[in-house]
Amino acid sequence: MATNVILPALGMAQDTGKIVEWLKAEGQHVTAGEPLVVVETDKAAVDLEAPATGILAQVSAKVGDEVPVAQVIAVILSAEEAEAGASQPERAPAPAIPADGMSVPGPSARPVAVSASVAVPSQPHGANGRRLASPKARRIAAERGVDLAALRGTGPGGVVLAADVASAMSSAPAATVPPPASHLSPAAGPAPAAVIGGGSEVSTIWRLMAERTTQSWTTIPHFFLMREVAAEALVAWRERAAQGTSERVTYTDLLVRIVAEALRRHPRLNASWQDGAIIHHDEINIGLAVAVEDGLVVPVIHQAGDLTPGGIARRRAELVGRAQAGKLRPPDLQGGTFTISNLGMYGIDAFNAIINAPQAAILAIGRMVDRVVPVNGQPAVRPMLTLSLSCDHRVVDGARGAEFLATVAALIEEPLALPA
């Protein structure tokens, strides 16, 4: 039986994905689970895996196409169907995409395989009712006050592209399009390729990072809380944890476990702001900011509170390895509810991080350094760690953020308080 290859959702705000490269040609044999196509989303460029074994056929999305989430982009036929010249599977509705976007697919899922083809309306909308548009088009429309619902999209299936927004702006009366709010807003018209010193183009991952951080910084009301924490017990815990596993346990691994427990006690930090409401997440899935050659990606450790330090270390090593090799898979990037960014290994004492939207907060961690501090009224040298919590004020107020950070600090200073 033929199996459709559809474009999955990788995040809550994703409506489309861009086809970067087909790793298999039409007519070639593919094996279930092997990388099939590289897709660029608002998070990163990822490999989508083949959902079945067979012959790749009916490739409908070309390199460079912006494709709506849940649209069929190819079909995998059995050997018998390929020989018989089997036609496309019987039409049926596309699988529904939940409004929260975080369960398609779930933590252990792969790109969904269904026996259905998708009929895309002339003005397609996502399952959450939003007009389908590329991330860049959505960002420019928001900055310039353009109503996406009123635009005719020229992308595949009627998806609104950045050029469609620019065209609408240029044809509208000058008074209806507000001027840029700041120097960060793009000029009207198609944007030229971004360049850096020497005239080289910015990588896809870097461009996506730039767009997402700009959108987060300019649309989310950030506030920051900082706290210095004694890390003696954390050092001792790492030594004990390393003895009980063959994995290389790092301070980041231990902090993932601590943060997961703090989120369980303070669920308001494990939430998002969406359509004027606070959405609470049942799972605690912690993203780790990872620097790669082309920029920054945030792979996710799912159900972090259920893992031992050794289990977290194993999962973190797998994710970092795939990130640095450019081989992250869709499940590696999906479902994050909170992010940790650790620059301690670079000698940074403290810093404030930009929130990884649509999450409510991100924890920035500086280096561990010996400082002279008072202990029982006497000066003593102790290893100290500086934490900085960035919060979305629409979801978290100062008191809730302070209580969460106090719990993290208490668990660092006394990790034996963690449940077994």
Image (spheres, rainbow, N blue to C red):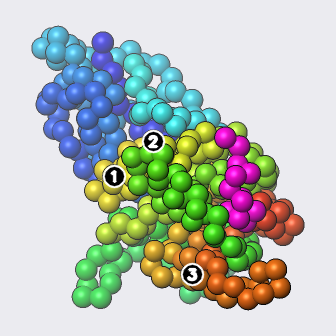
Q: Is mark 1 on a helix, strand or loop?
A: helix
Mark 1: which amino acid? Arg
Number of residues whose C-alpha sits closer than 10 Å to that of mark 3, classed few (under 14), some (14–19) or many (20 or more): some
Residue 418 is covered by the magenta coloring = yes
Instruction: Name the spot of residue 335 as percent of width and height, x first.
Output: 56, 45
Q: Is residue 74 visible?
A: no
| Residue annotated with mark 3 | 369
Instruction: Name the spot of residue 303 as percent of width and height, x first.
Output: 59, 41
Lower sequence index among marks 2 and 3: 2
Q: Which residue is drawn at 20% across and 43% down?
A: 23
Q: Is mark 2 on a helix, strand or loop?
A: helix
Instruction: Name the spot of residue 129 as percent of width and height, x first.
Output: 65, 42
Q: Report the predominant secondary structure element of the magenta stretch.
A: helix
| Residue annotated with mark 2 | 331
Q: What element carries label 3?
A: strand
Residues at marks 1 and 2, CA–CA distance in whole angstroms: 12 Å
Q: Residue 34 or 159: which is nearer the viewer?
A: 34
Mark 2: which amino acid? Pro
Instruction: Name the spot of residue 214 as percent of width and height, x first.
Output: 56, 73
| Residue annotated with mark 1 | 322
